Amino acid sequence: MDEKKPDPNWPARFYGPDGEAGVFERKEDVPKGWADSPAKLKAKPAPAVPTAGQP
């Protein structure tokens, strides 16, 4: 019997750029741009807020 041992790192939780979270069974299933920690996601710049007197 030559069965592969299951990878202890999977299933794993990943976080999306828009605050989503999901559990994935394999690395190949994780969508591009998702990270294994919310801290690893690139921060999006805040939208510009017009100030008084500015067009």
Image: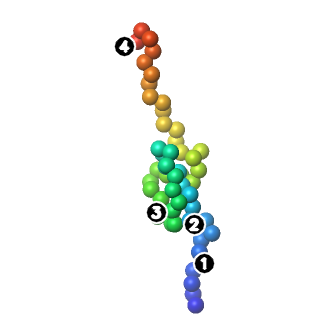
Q: Are marks 3 and 2 in contact (CB under 8 Å)?
A: no
Q: Residues within 10 Å of mark 1 (few under 14, many from 20)?
A: few
- Residue named by callout 1: 5
Q: Amino acid at mark 4?
A: Pro
Say which label, 1 or 3, has the lower sequence index.
Answer: 1
Q: Residue at 58% of width from left, 90% of height from top?
A: 1
- Residue named by callout 4: 55
Say which label, 1 or 4, has the lower sequence index.
Answer: 1
- Residue named by callout 3: 29
Label 4 vs label 3: CA separation? 46 Å
Q: Position of residue 24 (x, y in %)?
A: 51, 62
Q: Residues within 10 Å of mark 2 (few under 14, many from 20)?
A: few
Residue most extreme to the left: 55
Q: Residues within 10 Å of mark 3 (few under 14, many from 20)?
A: few
Q: Amino acid at mark 1?
A: Lys
Label 2 vs label 4: CA separation? 52 Å
Q: Amino acid at mark 2?
A: Trp
Label 1 vs label 4: CA separation? 63 Å
Under circle 2, the secondary element is loop
Say which label, 2 or 1, has the lower sequence index.
Answer: 1
Say which label, 2 or 4, has the lower sequence index.
Answer: 2
Q: Residue at 40% of width from left, 12% of height from top?
A: 54
Label 2 vs label 1: CA separation? 12 Å
Q: Amino acid at mark 3?
A: Asp
